[in-house]
Amino acid sequence: MTLKSIFLVLSLLISPPLFAVGLGQLNPEQLQSLQQSQNALIVDVRTPAEWQASGVIPNSQKLQGFDSNGKFDADKWLSDLQKLKSSAEQPVILVCRSGNRSGKIGDILAQHGEKNIYHLSNGIQGWIQSGLPVKAD
């Protein structure tokens, strides 16, 4: 195990947002670590045009959050999300362009009693700026 890997695991274990009852925020390294250690489900909540424009994080699932009118149907979205999860306890990491929409959706999910919900701070923009790969949509 490299020093960087050890640091990532330790930061994941002691990072306060990961123990929060509500929505937790992750940086790209924490996202990778949570995905590897706990099989976290990465859900990209952007629009199809955004997926096409910048690509998506490898192994992520696409589930548009807000419709073209800015509405979010929490019940339908949660139902669709449950179909993607491998277990009720599987952590879910939400991704949008900048972290704004994923944060809003995460807060809504937390209010609906969902646990293990996180979002990528600075969204796909932060992911790309960190030099991490994306795959074409």
Image (cartoon, helix red, strand yellow):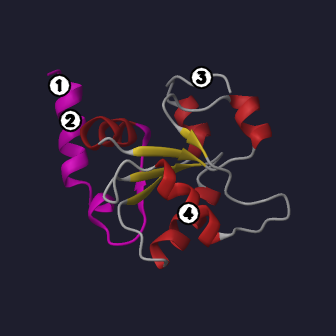
Residue type, label 4: Ser
Quarter holding the N terminus is top left
Provide the residue designation for mark 1. Answer: 3
Quarter holding the C terminus is top right
Say which element carries label 1.
helix
Say which element carries label 2.
helix
Q: Residues within 10 Å of mark 3 (few under 14, many from 20)?
A: few
Q: Is 26 in front, or is 72?
A: 72
Provide the residue designation for mark 3. Answer: 135
**Mark carried by residue 7:** 2
* Residue contact at pointers 4 and 1, CB within 8 angstroms: no
Q: Residues within 10 Å of mark 2 (few under 14, many from 20)?
A: few
Residue at far right of view: 69
* Residue contact at pointers 1 and 2, CB within 8 angstroms: yes
Residues drawn in magenta: 1-28
Magenta region, main secondary structure = helix
* Residue contact at pointers 4 and 3, CB within 8 angstroms: no
Q: Is residue 25 magenta?
A: yes
Q: Reading the chain from its start, which is encountered first: label 4 or label 1?
A: 1
Q: Reading the chain from its start, which is encountered first: label 4 or label 3?
A: 4
Provide the residue designation for mark 4. Answer: 79
Q: Is 88 in front, or is 103?
A: 88
